[in-house]
Image (cartoon, rainbow, N blue to C red):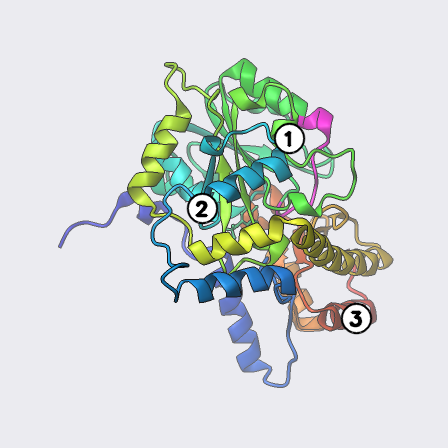
Amino acid sequence: MIPRNRCVQNLKAGYLFPEIARRRREFAASHPEARIISLGVGNTTEPILPHTNNALVEAARALGTAAGYSGYADEGLLSLRERISDVFYAGRFGPDEIFISDGAKCDIGRLQLLFGARTNIAVQDPSYPVYVDGSVLTGAAGSGNGAGYQGITYLPCTRENGYFPDLSRVPPGSLIYFCSPNNPTGATATREQLGALVGAALDKGCLIVFDGAYCEYIRNPLLPKSIFELDGAAACAVEVNSFSKSAGFTGVRLGWTVVPKALRYAGGESVNDDWARLTATVFNGASNIAQAGGLGALDAEGRKETRALTDFYLGNAGIIRGALQSLGISCAGGDNSPYIWACFPGRDSWEVFEEVLETCQIITTPGSGFGPAGQSFIRFSAFGHRACVEEACARLRRTGIKP
Ligand code: PLP
């Protein structure tokens, strides 16, 4: 038999969420009476709202008719690419700079193929796991231990630095992953901070993969929703984005990536040309039903629905944050983001996870699973039914968990 791929072998055992699911099963087996509430994963819980849902239904119905049938639409519906440019980027990108995908995570995985095994990787620490794990899979990062993976520059985002990293630590020529509003810290970068990030990338010849999956949660009008609001970003950044958390498409699957034509490798070649070639090679386009749903979500009625859905989850976030703060637990996020990052100074994240599970029967996510600087934190997700969130918060208050 052929040998195992060393890169796969290098992935640390137990991706975070399967490990949480294992502990949950174990707890449920030993506490059959427990009524477990999950505020752990970032999966959406509320139904897709009627106007957007109707766009999905109509598209599915049309596929059963001769007039409405369509097959591959590799690069994505032109109307959807134009609409995304208008809604999110004030029309500044042409449709050939916007690539429709089956989700941000899938594109983050594919993007790594563009840069290969020799690239330095710099990530916010803590960060969404696919940035690091995807780098391990392409060989850009080596084997790991408790302190992280070889070949990755971790940029600690801590209470002390306001969850924005020290950019002087970024090695020249790095591929920088940056997510705002951030999963897991819930922190949203200011215009000055993103400006500094773009400036550092231009100075050091770095390329930024900006993940804006939670941009629709931003309520503070002073905070940028896209990296492309900053001058110079089109020469040093791509942006991945998603309908998952804004329209409830976690299961429908739809996202996009902006790759500006102005973006060039060190040798002057076009990144956009390579991305078009690469996606045509390993991807056959997003579902045409999902794309019709995306168009529905981006018209006037759909935009109102997005606002209502994200308002609902932000309402949950406010309730969770309020409960934690009433217990004296310091937290970040939950205002322009659906995640609340709760600090338990000096404690181990998995130990706090276990305590919250044992005493409140609530599933959270241990911060250390997102990177070394996540130690001593747990993440609460606002994706849940309102009654569950209220019940979870009542339990937290009753049991009086301490920081
Ligand atoms: N990016 C971030 C930061 C996320 O937290 C998630 C999902 O939790 C994704 C991307 C995944 O997006 P999609 O569902 O479009 O693959």
Q: Quadrant of residue 47?
A: bottom right
Q: Is disc 1's CB within 8 Å of ligand 1?
A: no
Determine whether the beta carbon of the residue marked 2 sits less than 8 angstroms from the nearest atom of ligand 1: yes
Q: For the residues marked 1 and 3, what is the alpha-carbon distance in whole angstroms?
A: 35 Å
Going by the numbered disc 2, the residue's amino acid type is Ser
Residue under the point 64% across and 32% down: 90
Name the residue tied to disc 2: 101
Q: Which residue is depicted at the point 78% across and 58% down?
A: 315
Is there CB contact under 8 Å for labels 1 and 3?
A: no
Residue 53 or 331: which is nearer the viewer? Answer: 53
* Mark pair 3, 2: CA separation: 44 Å
Q: Badge 1 is on which residue?
A: 165
Q: Is residue 41 visible?
A: no
Dot 3 corresponds to which residue? 399
With respect to residue 399, does 199 lie above or below? Answer: above
Q: Amino acid at mark 1?
A: Pro
Q: Specify whether tag 3 is near ligand 1 (CB below 8 Å).
A: no
Name the foreground residue: 298 vs 119.
298
